[in-house]
Image: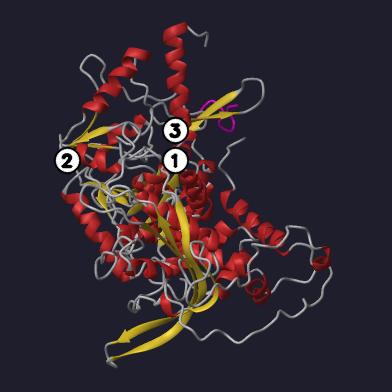
Amino acid sequence: MSEGYSFAYLDAATKRMIRRALLKALAVPGYQVPFASREMPMPYGWGTGGVQVTAACLIPEDVLKVIDQGADDTTNAVSIRRFFERTAGVATTTRTTEASVIQTRHRIPEAALTERQILVYQVPIPEPLRFLEPREAETRRMHALADYGLMHVKLYEDIARHGAIATSYAYPVLVEGRYVMDPSPIPKFDNPKLSGCPAIQLFGAGREARIHALPPYTRVVSLDFEDHPFVPSKADAACDLCGAEASYLDEVITDDAGGRMFCCSDTDFCAGRCAAGHAGRLSEGRA
Amino acid sequence: MYVATKGGERAIDAAHAWLAEERRGDPSVPELSVAQIAQQLTLAVNRVMAEGSLYDPDLAALAIKQARGDLIEAVFLIRAYRTTLPRFGASLPVETEAMQITRRISATFKDVPGGQVLGPTFDYTHRLLDFALAAEGAPPPAARVPADAAPAPHVLGLLDRDGLMEPLTAGPETPPDLTREPLELPAARATRLQALARADEGFVLGLAYSTQRGYGRTHAFVGELRIGLCAVEMEIPELGFVLEIGEVELTECETVNQFTGSKTEPPQFTRGYGLVFGQSERKAISMSLVDRALRWEELGEDATGAPAQDAEFVLSHCDNIQATGFLEHIKLPHYVDFQSELELIRRLRRDTEGEPQ
């Protein structure tokens, strides 16, 4: 553990300030709580919100998992995991089932989460209405009045123009029938996992200084229309490594002649299946 | 088997080692010392202190060395260090009127009480490369005269006595601190000034320039620009008296701006204010122009839609650490979101064109 810094880097007063924001966010699911985001030793936009939320939640007994794009070994996940290994000295893991706190960017793990777990999302722009209305003063008013007509018009215009809702990630959701929330840039494939989740879900946006949250078993509905229902989607293929057909897939270009393969974006899920004997098109001994 | 994500840990270690080598450069060339940077690149040090919001020339010099001269990266290092420092208390407001002046000019009066002091400025140098600097050698000594003991009152204060300046209104007893409280909009002037003092020099310069070219024009005169050392004093409750704990170099700019008056107010001049750590006069002047432009509402002016009048736009985008972090984060992997976009665009194309696939 690093000398001269508090456990998990942040000082006690800062953690208390963040915990108060977290409690408020949990009490008002989907509402964006302003908090006095600190300057962290990693750049804004690289997970400073998630890192502050994780730091405020961690206790020495925690087991931490950090993923980016579903993978434990992407560079920024490695960097953030090392940060907490160094500043908090907590145990880390790549196994979803073993982790008590999971910090994620852009994915929800495939394995079902439990009541013993906290999922911390890194959030770039917490405001679902931001690209429809750039002004914060205005969007806060719209949330206060539950004035979401602009969002429905946007979704309707998508259908009129493209025949479908042309949002594939950061797909807006309605939380407990009250606040429209941005679930962070997870693929809409992951949206159904937001609802009724036994784990606590916390969303930290450092640069924008906002925290929002979903307490366990919160009802979360992806916005849609009766005649254009929400459809979670993924690549129409199976994982070439483990054969999984229902996991979210990354597409990897393998040559310059149109060759490609698919593999699970959740590396722990994929490795677990491979270890259990599942095989895909390109597994060792098959290809 | 190609999987793009493997080897992240090894790659990071190797990248850091390579970076350290590149920072040092050719080892046969003597290494820069932190003291050399602090003494000879003082304006870079000043900028890092101003935008890093931490007055410590040695740390700023270290940050510049560590950042390989990338000043925004150096500001970032200082900010990340600063955020961990405990707060012992707040100083009393610094008395810029009592500044030990190294430079002080007024563009509105030919002479002013306390005099015009040109000081160490580039202003009237001819921008010709000085090849003598490529060789080493001491500069000839500058002429010296004893400091003028006469007080140098604020120039705007002199106009104020005649009622020609808008009166100063007292702000809150303790101004809010952006680094400890989230920015709330609309923001009061004290918050705006704090944001501008920490803001990216280039961004504030661009905005200030835009007001001069007509986007939220306020027609500013530099009433006074002063640079020098100011005492920092603190009241120590245990001792029951005020103690000087150090001094900081500051640049202060006050502009005099036109104001035609309104139904309730007779015509009088209005103010723009800039205050920056170190000798940072481009920044201080820019700040005072943008401050004045942002005051359109309280002065009953019309919103023209100019960027420099738009407080939410200015305050949300002036911080270079926020800006560069978010800008550069698009280097991070986005293949999950991109994958979902790929699927969407393929499906939409299939639906509309019957794309062969």
Identify the mark at residue B337; answer none if there is no mark: 3
Image depth: mark 1 or mark 3 in front: 1
Q: Residue A279 in magenta? A: yes
* Label 2 to label 1: alpha-carbon separation: 33 Å
Quadrant the C terminus of chain A occupies: top right
* Chain assignment, label 1: B
Q: CA distance from mark 1 to mark 3?
A: 38 Å
Range shown magenta? A275-287
- Residue matched to label 2: A144
**What element does badge 3 sit on?**
helix
Percent coordinates x, y for residue A188 in the rendering: 35, 30
Figure check: A217 above or below A263: below
Given the image, what chain letter belongs to the residue carrying mark 2? A
Whether the residues at callouts 3 and 2 have beta carbons within 8 Å, the answer is: no
- Seen as rendered, the residue at the extreme bottom is B239
Q: Where does label 1 land, which residue?
A: B215
Other-residue count near label 3 (Cα within 10 Å), few / some / many at <14 / 14–19 / ≥20: many
Mark 1 element type: loop
Q: Residues within 10 Å of mark 2 (few under 14, many from 20)?
A: few
- Categorize mark 1 by other alpha carbons within 10 Å: few (<14), some (14-19), many (20+): some
